[in-house]
Image: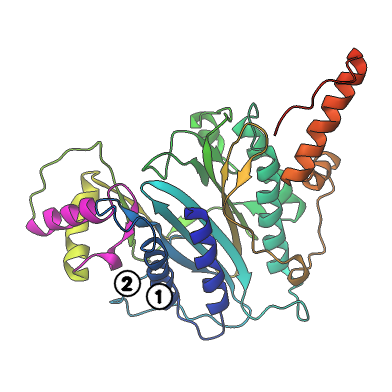
Amino acid sequence: MAGTMANNVMKQLIQKCVDGASSIELCKFGDAQIVKETSTVFKKEKEMLKGVAFPTAVCVNECVCHYSPLDSESKIIIMKTGDVVKLDLAVHIDGFIAALAHTLVVGCTKDNPVTDRRADVINAAYLCSEAALRLIKPGNKTNEVTKAVDKISESFKCKAVQGMLSHQLQYNRIDGEKTIIQNPNEKQRQDHEESEFEVHEVFAVDCLVSSGEGHPKDMDARTTIYKRNPDIVYQLKMKASRMVLSEVEKKFNTMCFTLRSLEDEKKAKMGIVECYKHDLCTPFPVLWEKEGEFVAQFKFTILIMPNTPMRITDSFFDPDCYKSSHKVTDPELQNLLNASTSKRAAKKKRKKAASKAAAETGDAGAPVAAE
């Protein structure tokens, strides 16, 4: 249900990415639509929390992630034709989360496709997400996804954004225990714990690729997105801080929120400082690549089922709009990307395997395993 709602909101946001569109208006629209969609279900469950799991972020060109500005900010990014725009959001219903991100070029159409470095980075990020979709299944390791993402990025003369994590989604938790890391440096490689995918786990698979070096930096943009840490206890000194924390606990529990969504933005900006200084809230800083470079992002949510992984947030990528001169040449990765992900194909494959096994054992009348 949350996945369907995330898809609906993303469709509407994509239509609004036009020349002259304001990043803050899109962020506010996305969050409002998530609240509107989720308010239509479980109306009688007055205590049930539902709505924004991660605030709508709109990142343009070299901005990597987490840009969701406030009304009080003087400098707001206005989109123009040719900009690379990343849309990122997540919906939850009673703590069950569906996350989704998409990249597009403003004004791009099938009749007027993008053919430069923007096409390279967008195709790379999209194919990274498609490879991950095929590799996330019971028994495979997280490191297999890391290797595929790095190789595909390099095929397009791009770099996976260093150190970015895809998280396991757990009940009321957007940053679960298991993670997939992109393009780790030596220290990150040593510190990161490799895991095995298991049945019934859920992952938000987040692929970010840069046309540059892929080293994200925190610059001068204000951090507006935070998440409460329920395990940390501290007696806040400032009244504004206590008010902010109380409002966050009541409205969002452990979900990510933006200062824009709090009742008094001015007090929120004051009170949040003490909260994150004492680890009561985790900040999500706005990160940037070098000026003049482009970053693309594709994110989807996948449920690892016993037979076939189930993708619950859609891809809105149109290959006819982005024509790159590069392609994946590694035979192993080509085979992986050509593999079908449809339930029907998986069912046929299982039936074929069952029939073959029956023929080899001489048990021609053996029933095929049920779906």
Which badge, 1 or 2, comes first in the chain's sequence? 1
Hey, which quadrant is residue 151 in on the image?
A: top right
The percent coordinates of residue 142 (x first, y second) are 60, 33
Q: Nearer the viewer, residue 244 or 77?
A: 244
Hey, which quadrant is residue 29 in on the image?
A: bottom left
Q: Which residues are magenta?
A: 239-263
Q: Residue at x 31, y 76 (%)?
A: 73
**Side (left or right) of 370 relative to 24:** right
Vertically, is 89 above or below 347?
below
Using the image, tell me which numbered label, if any, was put on residue 45. none
Vertically, is 164 above or below 272?
above
Q: CA distance from mark 1 to mark 2?
A: 7 Å
Tell me the quadrant of the picture where the C terminus can be found.
top right
Using the image, tell me which numbered label, if any, was put on residue 24. 1
Classified by dominant secondary structure, the portion drawn in magenta counts as helix
Q: Residue at x 71, y 53 (%)?
A: 127
Using the image, tell me which numbered label, if any, was put on residue 70. 2
The disc labelled 1 sits on which kind of residue? Ile
Task: Give the residue at the far bottom of this rendering.
Answer: 20
